[in-house]
Amino acid sequence: MERFTVAMFPTRKQTRVILSQGERVLLRATLPAPTSLRHERAVTTWLEGLALWLDTRLYVVLCADASHASFCLGLTDELGRGMGSIFFTVEVAHPEPRRRQREDSRSSS
């Protein structure tokens, strides 16, 4: 059985979440921005509940740039490294900066 992966993409306006098992997408959600969370354990409690529902340990990929990773959603330590529990493990993935479309079109010519 392939592992369950939760990819989280927090931004200033929202948090996108994708739950997948291998290539199969099971859930897509758009949740409020991390800054709107009132309870510090909201995200970890949600992940724990999801792990219990699926009866497995989750692999969480937090896609956040360096400036957000150090405090994002309570899933990282002070150094920006992913934390975990018996319910999930977190890896921080720093997204590559996007090139502007204009630069992309020049390089393909």
Image (cartoon, rainbow, N blue to C red):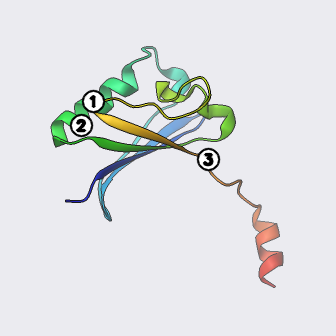
Left or right? Give the position of 2 relative to 74: left
What residue would you read off at disc 1?
48
What residue would you read off at disc 2?
51
What residue would you read off at disc 3?
94
Amino acid type, residue under disc 1 in the picture? Glu
- Per the model, the C-alpha gap separating discs 1 and 2 is 5 Å
Pointers 1 and 2 in contact (C-beta within 8 Å): yes
Q: Percent from the top left, x then y, of residue 86?
A: 28, 31
- Per the model, the C-alpha gap separating discs 1 and 3 is 24 Å
In the displayed structure, 64 sits above or below 107; it is above
Which quadrant of the view contains residue 12? top right
Count of all numbered marks drawn on residues in the image: 3
Q: Front-most of 96 and 85?
A: 85
Amino acid type, residue under disc 2 in the picture? Ala
Q: Element under label 1?
A: helix
Locate the N terminus and report the quarter of the image it occupies: bottom left
Left or right? Give the position of 75 relative to 58: right
* Label 3 environment density (alpha carbons within 10 Å; few <14, some 14–19, many ≥20): some
Left or right? Give the position of 3 relative to 106: left
Locate the C terminus and report the quarter of the image it occupies: bottom right
Q: Earlier in the sequence, mark 1 or mark 3?
A: 1
Q: Element under label 3?
A: loop
In percent of the image, x 49 and y 27: which residue is there? Answer: 73
Amino acid type, residue under disc 3 in the picture? His
* Label 1 environment density (alpha carbons within 10 Å; few <14, some 14–19, many ≥20): some
Which numbered tag is attached to residue 8? none
In percent of the image, x 71 and y 53: which residue is there? Answer: 97
